Image (cartoon, grey):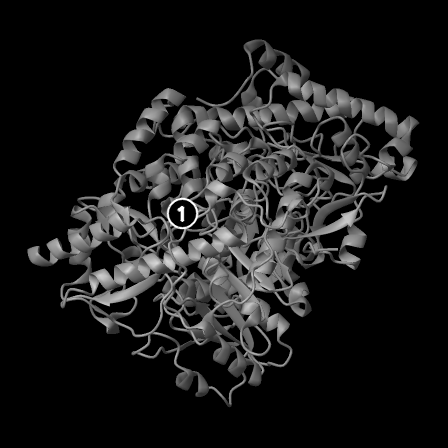
C-alpha cells in the first residue's frame, strides 16, 4: 500500500493553479453562523495528487487490465467510447432542471432507450428512475405492495424468495415492508414446487425470482411457477440484474413476470466504477404501470418531456432527487446503439457459449461442477467441497491463489446453498484464448491443491499485500486517518 | 456491433469441446414456447464513428446559456486531473472491492474519502457513499430509528425548507417501514425553519429532526438552536448540508452544545458534473456511538499476514449479502467512482481552495441579488443571510419569465411555484464561483430586457 495522502502534506503547500483568488474575504453572514476551524484536508501539489492516485489505481485489478470472471457481476468490456461520448460538454453541463427546449437531445436518447429496453424484456411499462439494482428491486416490490393495497387487499404481507437469491432480494423486500419466506431449491437446481405450494396462499404478495437462477441454470418450471403464484393472487418479480444469458433468446415478460429491474451496469456495458454508480430501471406489465416510480420520460406532440404526472397517478413515488443516474443511462443508450438489435441477439449466444465451454474445460480438469448435467447459463458453479475435506483448502484459498496468476477471483461463497463454491462468469467479450489461459491456471492450481496446499493457504504471494486480516479490521475499527 | 472476439475457428473448436452442432443447442433447456428467435429489429448496429456523429448531433440540441439554476445541483469548476484520474480503467472498470488484495487502489482511496468527509462535517466516521442526497435522507431516517434508543416512535420532523424532492424520496424509501415524516413549516419572513412551530412538538416522542443548511431557499437556518432543542427533547439531529458551504458555515459537528448526530448531503459539488442529475453521490457521516447502525459500505484499515497495513471492506455483518432480510439497508452497489472523483477533487483544492470557492459563491450570489433587486419590480422574498442561492418574487409567472430569459442565453433559475405555491411567482437563483462579473451583468441585463418585453 501507499502512504495515505495526508502523510504527504506539507503545511502551506497547494495546487497553485486551482486556487480561486479573492479580491476580498468580505461576507454578508453573521459570525455566529460561521465555521471557526479548517477541516483536515491534504496540503499537496497537483503533481503529488496525480502520482498518488495514479499509483493507487495501479493497485486494482480491473476489466481493462485483468480477466475478471466474477460471477453474477457480468464484468464484460466497457467500450471506451461510452465514457467519451457521455462526456460531451453539452451532456455534462445539462442541469437536471434545464428547460425542455434545452434538453431534447438527452431526452430523445432516454425515450429511445426506454423503447428498446421494453422490447428486450417484453413489457409495456418502464421507468428509468432507480439508481442501482437494489433500488430497482425495492421499486419493484414496492409496486407489488402498492398494487395490492390499491385493491384493498391488505393481508398480503409475505414475499417468497428462493434460498439461492442474491442478498439484496430479501433485504429489499424487508425495506418495502414485507416478511420474507424462503423456499428451497431441489438438487437439480430448480425451485422445489412441493415446498412452494405449501408456502403460498392469500398472504402471498409475490415471489422474487432470477431466471436463469444464481446457480447458473434456467428455471425450467417457470410457467408452472407463474401459474401457481398468479392463482393465489400474487405477482412475479424478476431480478434482471444479469440479462446476459437470455439476450435475444427469451423475455421475462413472456415467462409470466409482472415487474422487473435491469442493471444497466451489468448487461448493458456501463462500467462498475469500483462499486458504482449503477442504474436499475424497472419495467412492468400493463396493470402495474400506474405504480411506476417517477419521473418518466415521455413524448408529447411537440417534444420529449420529463413527467411526474399522468399515467402514474398511483406511483410509489420518487427515488432520487432528479432523474436517476442519467449519465449511466446515456452510456447504456450508446451501448445499445452500437450493438443494435442484431448485436444484442449475439450477446446471449456468446456469453452462454463461453460459460459452457469454460464449465466443460474445468470439469475435464477435475473440478466438481455440481450442475454439469445441466446447460450453463452465462455463469456456472464449481464446488471445492471435496478438496476442502481432503486437503483442507477452501474456496477462498483458491480465489486468493488466482490473484497470484493475475486472474481476478470468481465470486466465492455465493450462492450460499452450495458449500465452498466459486461462481464463474466469463462474459461474451473474452476470447477462447483468454479462457484457455484461465483453464491452464486452474489446472495448475488443482495440482497445487494436491501437492502443495500450503501455497494456497498462504496465498496471495505475488500481490503487493498478503492476505488481509478482516477480523482485526472489525474488532478494532480504524475508519478514518488520524495524525499519529 | 457486439464486442465478441470469436473467430469461426474458435467457435468450431468450442462447439467440438461441448459436443454440440450449433450454439442453438445451448438453449435447449428454455421451454420452446418461451424462445424468441430475435428481437423486433428496432435499430441497426452502428460503428463507433457513426455513433459519435449521432451523439454529437444529440448533444448539440442541449446547448444552453449561462446556468444560474441550483436547487440541489451546482455548477462548480472541476480541475482537469479529477476525471483524468477517476476515469482510468483501473478505477472505472473494477468491481466493488470484495477481493481486498486485488483492490487496494479503490479501498485506500475510499478510506481517504471517509477521512475527508468525516473532517469536513465534523463527525467521527463516514461510510463509503450512498446513491444521492435525497435517498440519504430516507436511509438516515431509518438509521436514526435504529440509533435512538430513547425514542419509541418512528416520528421524524422534517423542515419544510428541505429540498422538496428529498422529502418525497425519503417518504418513498422509509414509509413502508412505518416511518412517519412530519413537515415543520418555515417562517414566511425569513424563509427559515420556525422555532415556534418546532416547539409545538415539545411534548411528543420524536426520533429525529432533519434540517438542511443552507436550506432549499439558500437561507441560513438557526442550526445551533434547532440542535439544542432536539437534544433537549431526546431527538437525534440529521443535518443535510452542502459540502462546499460548510467550509464557510459552521460544520454540523459544532452545531449547538453537542453537535448533530448524523450528517448527510449530496456530494455533487465536489467534482461531479451536472450531467442531467446524476450520477452524483450521497455522503453520510456520524458520531462514533452510532456507526454500527450505519447503512452501506465502510472501509477499514487493517494489516496483512506480514503486518503490513492495508484496507478491507469492514463491518460487513450489517450488510445485505450477510444479514439478508435483517440488513441495515438493501444498498449494495453505491456511487464508488463519484466518491473517488470527489477525493481527488478535495485533494487538489485542499481546505483553502474549498473555503475560497465557498466565499466566491457567496459573494457572486450576493452581487447578483443586489443587481437584480435594483429594479423596483423585483424583490427578494426573504430577509436574512443567504449562501449562494436566493429567492426573488416577480410580477410575471415564473415559467414565462424563465423561457423569456432562456431566449437571452440565461438559464434563470428554479421555478418554486409548484413546490411552494404559497410563495406566488417565486424564482430560486444560484450563482457559484464559476460566474464572472460579466456573467452576472449579463443576467441583470437580460432580466431588464425581459421585463420590458413581457
Q: Is residue A473 above or below residue A355?
A: below
Q: Which residue is mark 1?
A: A128
Residue closest to the eye, A309 or A291: A309
In the current view of this chain or complex, which residue is farthest to the top?
B9
Q: Is residue B31 visible?
A: no
Residue drawn at (22%, 49%) of the image: B410
Q: Quadrant of residue B117?
A: bottom right
Which residue is drawn at the image coordinates 57% and 73% (left, top)? B259
Residue furthest to the front: A23
Left or right: B46 with respect to B438?
Answer: right
Q: Please give the chain letter of the residue carrying mark 1.
A: A
Residue B94 lies, with reference to residue B401, above or below; the image says above
Could you tell whether A366 is left or right of B261 in the image?
right
Horizontal placement of A324 versus A350: left or right? Answer: left
Q: Residues within 10 Å of mark 1 (few under 14, many from 20)?
A: many
Q: Residue at (35%, 43%) from the top-left corner?
A: A93
Mark 1 element type: loop
Front-most of residues A450 and A455: A455
Judged from this view, the residue extending furthest toward the bottom is: B203
Task: Check the picture and name the quadrant holding the C terminus of chain B.
Answer: bottom left
- Number of numbered discs overlaid on the protein picture: 1
Question: Who is closer to the viewer here, B381 or A400?
Answer: B381
Above-or-below relation of B382 to A272? below
Q: Position of residue A65 (x, y in %)?
A: 62, 27
Percent of width and height locating residue B140: 54, 66
For the N terminus of chain B, which image quadrant?
top left
- Percent x, y for residue A14? 55, 45
Instruction: Please provide percent x and percent y for residue B338.
Output: 51, 46
Left or right: B372 in relation to B5: left
Amino acid at each position: 500500500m501507499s502512504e495515505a495522502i495526508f502523510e504527504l502534506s506539507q503545511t502551506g503547500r497547494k495546487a497553485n493553479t486551482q486556487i480561486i483568488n479573492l479580491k476580498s474575504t468580505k461576507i454578508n453572514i453573521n459570525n455566529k453562523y460561521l465555521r471557526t476551524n479548517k477541516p483536515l484536508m491534504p496540503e499537496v501539489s497537483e503533481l503529488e495528487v496525480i502520482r498518488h492516485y495514479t499509483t493507487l489505481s495501479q493497485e486494482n485489478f480491473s476489466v481493462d487490465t485483468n480477466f475478471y470472471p466474477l460471477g453474477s457481476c457480468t464484468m464484460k468490456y466497457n467500450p471506451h467510447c461510452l465514457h467519451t461520448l457521455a462526456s460531451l460538454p453539452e451532456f455534462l453541463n445539462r442541469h437536471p432542471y434545464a428547460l425542455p427546449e434545452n434538453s431534447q437531445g438527452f431526452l430523445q436518447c432516454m425515450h429511445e432507450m426506454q423503447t428498446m429496453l421494453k422490447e428486450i424484456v417484453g413489457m409495456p411499462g418502464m421507468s428509468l428512475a432507480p439508481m442501482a439494482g437494489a433500488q430497482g428491486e425495492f421499486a419493484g416490490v414496492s409496486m407489488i405492495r402498492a398494487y395490492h393495497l390499491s385493491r384493498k387487499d391488505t393481508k398480503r404481507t409475505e414475499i417468497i424468495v428462493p434460498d439461492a437469491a442474491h442478498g439484496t432480494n430479501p433485504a429489499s423486500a424487508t425495506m418495502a415492508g414485507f416478511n420474507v419466506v424462503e423456499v428451497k431449491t431441489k438438487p437439480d437446481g430448480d425451485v422445489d414446487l412441493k415446498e412452494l405450494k405449501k408456502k403460498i396462499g392469500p398472504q402471498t404478495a409475490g415471489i422474487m425470482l432470477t431466471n436463469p437462477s444464481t446457480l447458473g441454470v434456467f428455471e425450467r418450471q417457470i410457467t408452472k411457477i407463474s401459474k401457481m403464484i398468479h392463482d393465489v393472487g400474487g405477482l412475479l418479480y424478476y431480478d434482471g440484474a444479469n440479462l446476459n444469458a437470455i439476450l435475444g433468446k427469451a423475455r421475462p415478460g413472456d415467462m409470466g413476470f409482472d415487474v422487473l429491474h435491469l442493471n444497466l451496469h451489468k448487461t448493458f456495458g456501463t462500467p462498475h466504477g469500483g462499486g458504482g454508480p449503477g442504474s436499475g430501471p424497472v419495467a412492468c406489465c400493463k396493470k402495474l404501470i400506474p405504480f411506476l416510480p417517477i419521473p418518466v420520460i415521455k413524448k408529447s406532440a411537440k417534444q420529449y418531456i420529463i413527467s411526474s404526472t399522468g399515467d402514474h397517478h398511483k406511483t410509489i413515488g420518487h427515488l432520487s432527487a432528479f432523474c436517476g443516474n442519467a449519465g449511466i443511462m446515456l452510456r447504456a443508450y450508446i451501448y445499445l446503439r452500437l450493438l443494435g438489435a442484431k448485436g444484442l441477439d449475439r450477446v446471449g449466444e456468446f456469453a452462454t457459449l463461453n460459460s459452457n465451454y469454460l464449465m466443460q474445460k474445468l470439469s475435464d480438469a477435475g473440478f466438481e461442477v455440481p450442475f454439469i448435467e445441466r446447460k450453463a447459463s452465462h455463469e456456472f458453479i464449481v464446488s471445492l467441497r471435496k478438496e476442502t475435506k481432503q486437503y483442507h483448502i477452501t474456496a477462498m484459498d483458491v480465489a486468493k491463489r488466482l490473484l497470484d496468476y493475475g486472474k481476478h477471483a470468481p465470486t466465492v461463497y455465493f450462492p450460499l446453498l452450495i458449500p465452498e463454491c466459486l461462481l464463474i462468469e466469463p462474459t461474451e467479450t473474452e476470447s477462447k484464448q483468454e479462457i484457455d489461459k484461465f483453464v491452464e491456471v486452474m489446472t495448475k492450481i488443482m495440482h497445487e491443491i494436491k501437492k502443495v496446499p500450503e501455497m494456497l493457504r498462504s496465498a496471495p504471494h505475488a500481490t503487493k499485500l498478503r492476505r488481509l486480516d478482516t477480523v482485526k479490521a472489525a474488532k478494532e475499527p480504524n475508519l478514518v486517518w488520524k495524525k499519529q | 456491433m457486439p464486442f465478441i472476439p470469436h473467430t469461426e475457428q474458435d467457435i468450431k473448436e468450442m462447439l467440438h469441446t461441448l459436443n454440440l452442432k450449433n450454439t442453438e443447442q445451448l438453449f435447449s433447456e428454455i421451454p420452446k414456447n418461451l424462445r424468441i428467435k430475435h428481437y423486433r429489429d428496432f435499430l441497426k448496429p452502428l460503428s463507433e464513428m457513426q455513433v459519435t456523429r449521432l451523439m454529437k448531433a444529440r448533444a448539440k440540441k442541449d446547448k444552453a446559456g449561462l446556468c444560474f439554476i441550483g436547487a440541489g445541483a451546482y455548477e462548480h469548476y472541476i480541475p482537469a486531473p479529477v476525471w483524468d484520474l477517476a476515469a482510468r480503467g483501473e478505477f472505472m472498470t473494477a468491481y466493488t472491492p470484495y477481493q481486498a488484495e486485488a483492490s487496494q487502489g479503490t479501498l485506500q482511496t475510499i478510506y481517504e474519502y471517509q477521512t475527508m468527509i468525516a473532517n469536513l462535517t465534523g463527525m467521527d466516521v463516514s461510510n463509503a457513499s450512498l446513491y444521492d442526497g435525497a435517498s440519504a435522507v430516507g436511509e438516515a431516517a431509518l438509521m436514526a430509528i435504529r440509533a435512538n434508543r430513547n425514542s419509541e416512535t418512528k416520528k421524524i420532523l422534517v423542515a419544510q425548507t428541505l429540498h422538496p424532492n428529498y422529502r418525497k424520496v425519503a417518504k418513498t424509501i422509509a414509509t413502508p417501514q412505518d416511518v412517519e415524516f412530519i413537515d415543520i413549516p418555515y417562517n414566511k419572513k425569513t424563509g427559515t425553519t420556525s422555532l415556534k412551530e418546532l416547539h409545538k412538538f415539545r411534548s411528543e416522542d420524536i426520533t429525529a429532526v432533519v434540517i438542511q443548511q443552507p436550506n432549499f431557499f439558500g437561507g441560513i437556518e438557526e442550526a445551533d438552536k434547532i440542535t439544542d432543542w432536539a437534544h433537549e427533547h431526546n431527538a437525534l439531529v440529521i443535518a443535510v448540508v452542502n459540502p462546499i458551504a460548510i467550509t464557510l458555515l459552521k460544520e454540523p459537528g459544532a452545531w449547538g452544545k453537542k453537535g448533530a448526530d448524523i450528517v448527510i448531503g449530496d456530494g455533487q459539488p465536489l467534482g461531479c458534473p451536472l450531467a442531467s442529475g446524476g450520477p452524483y453521490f450521497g455522503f453520510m457521516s456520524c458520531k462514533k456511538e452510532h456507526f454500527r447502525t450505519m447503512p452501506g459500505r465502510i472501509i477499514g484499515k487493517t494489516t496483512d499476514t506480514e503486518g503490513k497495513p492495508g484496507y478491507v471492506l469492514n463491518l460487513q455483518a450489517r450488510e445485505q449479502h450477510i444479514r439478508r432480510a435483517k440488513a441495515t439497508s438493501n444498498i449494495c452497489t453505491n456511487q464508488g467512482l463519484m466518491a473517488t472523483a470527489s477525493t481527488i477533487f478535495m485533494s487538489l483544492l485542499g481546505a483553502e481552495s474549498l473555503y475560497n470557492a465557498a466565499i466566491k459563491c457567496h459573494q457572486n450570489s450576493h452581487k447578483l441579488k443586489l443587481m437584480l433587486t435594483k429594479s423596483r419590480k423585483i424583490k427578494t422574498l426573504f430577509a436574512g443571510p443567504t449562501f449562494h442561492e436566493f429567492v426573488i418574487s416577480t410580477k410575471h409567472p415564473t415559467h414565462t419569465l424563465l423561457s423569456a430569459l432562456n431566449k437571452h442565453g440565461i438559464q434563470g433559475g428554479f421555478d418554486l411555484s409548484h413546490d411552494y405555491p404559497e410563495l406566488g411567482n417565486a424564482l430560486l437563483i444560484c450563482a457559484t464561483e464559476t460566474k464572472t462579473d460579466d456573467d452576472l451583468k449579463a443576467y441583470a441585463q437580460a432580466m431588464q430586457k425581459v421585463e420590458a418585453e413581457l
